[in-house]
Amino acid sequence: MEKRAVTELYPMLSVEEALEQVLSHFRPLEPERVPILEALDRVLAEDVYSSFDIPPRANSAMDGYALLAADTRGAGPQTPKRLRIIGDVAAGYVSEAAVTPGTAIRIMTGAPIPPGADAVVRFEDTKQQGEWVDVFIEVPAGNEIRLAGEDVRRGELVLRRGIRIRPQEVGMLASLGRQEVVVIRRPRVAVLATGDELVEAGHPLGPGKIYNSNSYSNAAQVIRYGGIPIMLGIARDRIPELTEKIKAGLAQGVDLFLVSGGVSVGDFDVVKNVLAAEGEITFWRVRMKPGKPMAFGRIGGVPLLGMPGNPVSVMVSFEIFARPAILTMMGITELDKPTVEAVLLDEVKYKDDRRHFLRVYVEGKNGEYYARLTGEQGSGILSSMVKANGLAIIPETWDHVPAGERVQVMML
Ligand code: AMP
Ligand code: MG
């Protein structure tokens, strides 16, 4: 592929245009049945109804005595009412004995209300005297009683299809007696690094070599947003080897292919060649910094994001393009990252009309957010990404940001 021809063939897109094109290739994946704990953070793909009341029967909200409210009439600190204790009942058991006028049953929190009783008085408002109990408080019928079905009614729609499962939904599924639930499956995301200079951790660094970090930062991002990374290692910058590694990855069954490096205009940037030869290129280059030389296309029916190799660029490209693609496949519709408005404390100047994503550290102070650059903003400076908790988004129309300007910050 001749360089000039390629730049003319593929006009540089804005971030919005590129994202729209990328997202048009994704939709929610199929549902699958999983154990309820594995449903966490995933989208529910069935309506969940209850086939019984929760709680199943009226029970005590306190440790105390089950009795008849009428027997407490007139009771007070100086005028206790004395009742005979005829039994006790703990949570998990049912009282055989029934409460009759003048009697009470010791009852523990969660135990079913014994027949006959219509109220519970807490231990704190009573004093036991052998077989007898003095009650120092007058209570109405229903006192400290949790009613059958007060949490969930039999037949009720408890969890609606399409919601995202949080710990409280997992707990609700368990209280419905569910062991499994139907959710959207997780996307399988291939992660491939390219570059003759790359070495895997655990091997010595030879002259001119660096460790492969992109595959790991990308795989961690995949996991963070709910996908399953399929680690494909490193491909050398040779068309046959890259082609072979991509085909081997496709054979594992993947929903998205992530490649880092080899998409710029260098002599060995062969990712576009392979994508064009074996599949198709939808676009190449996005008006953003970092992350300009990104290629998107399809290969073997699978969408492929060819992201730039610089360790910061690849992470930013992932956040902007791969993250919403993964969330869409998970069935999630809220694709925006939480963003805050912050006062940028540093002055910044630009040379070009790309959208800039600046690594910043945001702090709240007196109801206002303040952002500071975390250091050198070169695309290869991963340490300034490590120090950052947000990316300040500087519109492509700005060429200068004076200190004290308000900017939008996408929180990481
Ligand atoms: P490229 O986009 O292939 O020209 O790579 C741009 C820069 O990113 C080069 O300095 C590469 O050495 C570096 N780079 C590419 N891939 C990786 C990787 N997987 N891990 C760390 N650095 C990388
Ligand atoms: Mg390279």
Image (tube, rainbow, N blue to C red):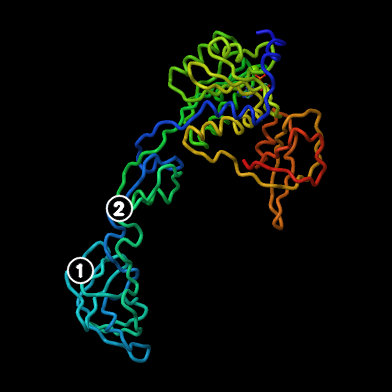
Q: Which quarter of the figure is the N terminus placed in?
A: top right
Residue at image position (40%, 46%) is 160
Which of pointers 1 and 2 indicates the residue nearer the eye? 2
Classify mark 2: helix, strand or loop. loop
Q: Amino acid at mark 1?
A: Ser
Where ligand 2 lies, by image quadrant? top right
Q: Residue furthest left?
A: 96
> Can you give x and y, in whole percent of width and height, for residue 38 in the image?
40, 40
Residue at image position (43%, 17%) is 251
Marks 1 and 2 close (CB-CB < 8 Å): no
Distance between the Cα atoms at labels 1 and 2?
28 Å
> Is 80 on the left-hand or right-hand side of 268?
left
> Which of the two residues, 368 or 359, is positioned nearer the viewer here?
368
> Label 2 neighbourhood size at 10 Å, few (<14), some (14-19), many (20+)?
few
> Which of the two residues, 28 or 86, is positioned nearer the viewer here?
28
User: Image quarter for residue 305?
Assistant: top right
> Label 1 neighbourhood size at 10 Å, few (<14), some (14-19), many (20+)?
some
Q: Which quarter of the figure is the C terminus placed in?
A: top right
> Which of the two residues, 218 or 335, is positioned nearer the viewer here?
335
Question: Relative to residue 128, is residue 323 depicted above or below?
Answer: above
Question: Relative to residue 113, is residue 272 depicted above or below?
Answer: above
Question: Relative to residue 4, is residue 350 depicted above or below?
Answer: below
Q: Amino acid at mark 2?
A: Gly
Nearest to N terminus: mark 1 or mark 2? 1
The residue identified by callout 1 is 95
The residue identified by callout 2 is 155
Classify mark 1: helix, strand or loop. loop
